[in-house]
Image (spheres, grey):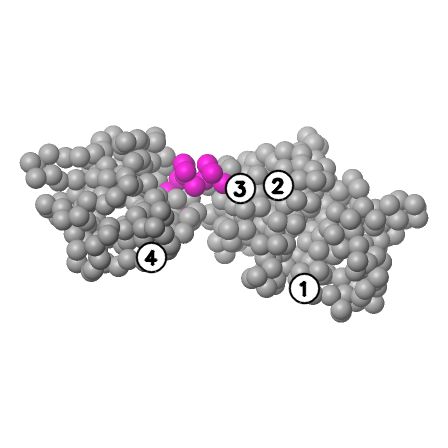
Amino acid sequence: MADISLNDLSFRYPGATDETLANLNLEIANGEAHALLGASGAGKTTLLNILSGLLVPTTGSLCFDGEDVSELSGRRRNVAQVFQFPVLYESLSVAENLAFPLKTRKADATLISQRIDYICKELEIDDIRARKPATLSLFQKQLVAVGKALAWPDVSMVLLDEPLTAVEPRTKWRLRQTLRRVQADLKVTMIYVTHDQTEALTFADRVSILSAGGIVQTGTPQELYSSPTHEFVGHFVGSPGMNFLPAEALGISGVERAGFRPEWVAPGFLEGAEADAPGATSTGGVIAGAITGRVLRTRIQGAQQGKPFGLITLATAHGEIAIQGEIPESTLKAGDRLKVQLTRCVGYNGQRKVRDIEFL
């Protein structure tokens, strides 16, 4: 395993006018589970190919344990990769597939036997080691593909290239949990590349959000959700994403925009607001963090302490927002007027975070 460093790393394809990746700086610790998360075109595949040794950075460097490996092949870096679709030899048994990476490097028979036993135990696939891939489920095939990636004991890094894309939805959670357990047990450095925020946030110790060839923010799942340092992260992480309003709409000064999660509201919504203006009270004063709007739609998501709980979409003077919490006992209908009080928000200038703001 290795500490991995990206130092001012950029890449431009031959003939292109713009860089696909620009000035990336990132530190991934030895044994860390890290995710690269971004939409299509963000630069994930290009970065993956640089990490695996298929591409060489145009500028900057990629280092393993402080050594520049930018121009080394993936084989010389001891990098293993798991793809979207399992790559297995159909004519070989599970055990023979697991042994193949070791045999190609002329490992001795004792090491091969020990590694196969160890991997089969860790991945809980000992009962299928004699079977051929054609007899396995897709879930089992992907486990074997992961086992192949872990076969060599001194692997520097395992790259997971959207490994759950082809897996049935009902088994995705199980495979993701297995991968996370194995990563933690073996303390192997794993980099999980995906466009799916659920996969990234439930697998990784830290996540790097990519957009337009740059890393917008790196942090723990909790940091990305609770304190996005860029508005893009607030939009991209969460379902639904963050609400954004002009700061003045919430009675806030010193910042341009305010972002808040749907659940950052005080318990209970205040019905029958006296005015449509955001933050207005019957006496004309302004309550910081209060917003008034008209109900567009509601969606019940469950119950808390026997009371309905869900999402309400409001039309405000500054655009639509979604709020989440206990829905008032009386039935809400489109056009009803509500005032809500936020508990906190994040202030932004030029889409960059300035400060956290607490109301209650």
For the residue marked with disc 4, what is the amino acid? Ile
CA gap between label 3 and label 4 equals 31 Å
The residue identified by callout 2 is: 33
Q: How crowded is mark 3: few (under 14 residues within 10 Å), some or many (20 or more)?
A: many
- Given the current orientation, which residue lies at the most extreme right position? 109
For the residue marked with disc 2, what is the amino acid? Ala
The residue identified by callout 3 is: 207
Which mark, residue 300?
4
Percent of width and height locating residue 159:
66, 48
User: Quick one: SS at disc 3?
Assistant: strand
**Looking at the image, which is closer to me, 313 or 57?**
313
Quadrant hosting residue 229: top left
Quadrant hosting residue 174: bottom right
Q: Which residue is painted at 70% across and 40% down in the image? A: 185
Q: What stretch is highlighted in magenta?
A: 221-232
The residue identified by callout 1 is: 138
Magenta stretch: residue 249 in it?
no
- Given the current orientation, which residue lies at the most extreme left position? 283
| Residue 219 relative to residue 27: left or right | left
* First along the sequence among labels 3 and 2: 2
The quarter in which the C terminus is drawn is top left
| Residue 202 relative to residue 316: left or right | right
